[in-house]
Image (spheres, rainbow, N blue to C red):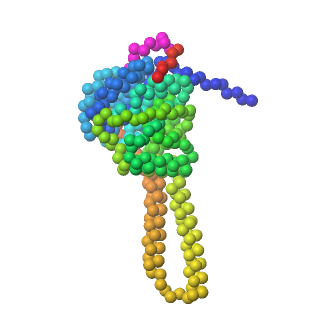
Amino acid sequence: MLTVPALPKNRPADALISCVIPAYNEAAHLADFLRDLRKTLAGFAVRYEIIVINDGSSDNTDEIMASLLHEGGLRYISFSRNFGKEAALSAGIDAAQGDAVILMDSDYQHPLELLPEMTRLWRDGIDMVYGVISDRSNESLLKRWGTGMFYHLMESGSPITIPRNAGDFRLMDKKVVDALRQLPERNRFMKGLYAWVGFSSIALPFVPADRATGVSSFNYRSLGRLAMAGVTAFTTLPLRIWSMVGFVISIIAILYAFWIAGESLLFGNDVPGWSTLAAGLMFFSGVQLISIGVLGEYLGRVYDEVKKRPLYVVAHDINNGPATTANSASDKDTTPCA
């Protein structure tokens, strides 16, 4: 019988921690956030790097970052235009050099207080620690309903399980990051990709804080596009649904044909039925157009993939290298506490 040796659970105490911070028009609070992030990292990390991805911001993010680049442990990647948060996260994952990589937003909605606990769980052998929103009561009823419908659809038709209410806030081991780098698709739904690569994982519940300044750039339209990307990337259930709709309509049409034939044989045919014919034509035309639209969404994704355009274009990349904190390197047998 083959015996598989137990894998080592403990991670090195002097591990490099990478923090990926996508930023889109976050200049008003970005400097304060990076200062607080540094303080948090200094409490448990011996070495760290902070990677800020400017996703084509139209504010003064470049000027804010220029004033901070003299500090060590900071890398600044600026896109040539806005490519979206999924592309910004992918760029950060591509650039990260750490033994563990943390993804989080710069608007203070992801609690910095959870980072030591995430790191502790990772050091204990968990490959991915992700945050789960435990309370959505401050969101609109429409958003909560839409979110519930999306997860129900994904759970019904996808072969993988995407945790409900889990977002991009997470810590990943280097091997998880390496697996994500191997995925070539351009239409990226990161929440699905995190689940697809697998590995051991654990959830940490949290309640998002209020944004430091401004409002979220994610409106209903953006959320709808993201949901459509997730559905088309991880399930073919919509195609199966419309195949079933077509089958049911065909059965109804056959039964209706028999009914008309029987009525004509028994009672004759006095030609009425124009309203029924017109309504039926409009109904079936609508069904066909919807079906073509669903098929077109999948075909459009294929079209985007075969063009093989880069996921993002970098305007400039400034790297100051990792920073080393005052944490003692001799205390390598200790485990950071939450």
> Which residue corresponds to the image point at 44% horizontal and 49% vertical from the top-left?
145
Quadrant in which the N terminus appears: top right
In this rendered view, identify the residue nearer to me: 194 or 216.
216
From the viewer's perspective, tell me whether residue 5 is left or right of residue 1: left
Residue 95 placement: quadrant: top left
Q: Is any part of residue 326 visible from this angle?
A: yes
Question: Compared with residue 295, is residue 209 higher up or lower down, i.e. above or below?
Answer: above
Q: Is any part of residue 91 visible from this angle?
A: no
Question: Compared with residue 187, is residue 244 higher up or lower down, i.e. above or below?
Answer: below
Question: Compared with residue 227, is residue 46 higher up or lower down, i.e. above or below?
Answer: above
Q: Of helix, strand and loop, which mostly describes the magenta segment? A: loop
Which residue reaches farthest right? 1
> Which residue corresponds to the image point at 60% horizontal and 82% vertical from the top-left?
262
From the viewer's perspective, tell me whether residue 313 is left or right of residue 272: left
Which residue reaches farthest front? 137
Where residue 85 appears, as percent x and y from the top left, is 38, 40
The residues colored magenta run: 322-332
> Which residue corresponds to the image point at 29% horizontal and 38% vertical from the top-left?
214
Where residue 331 appears, as percent x and y from the top left, is 48, 12
Question: Compared with residue 171, is residue 72 higher up or lower down, i.e. above or below?
Answer: above
Where residue 327 appears, as percent x and y from the top left, is 42, 15
Where residue 103 appears, as percent x and y from the top left, is 42, 33
- In the image, is residue 33 part of the stretch drawn in magenta? no
> Which residue corresponds to the image point at 52% horizontal and 23% vertical from the top-left?
123
From the viewer's perspective, tell me whether residue 3 is left or right of residue 224: right
Which residue reaches farthest top? 330
Q: How many marks?
A: 0
In this rendered view, identify the residue nearer to me: 166 or 183.
166
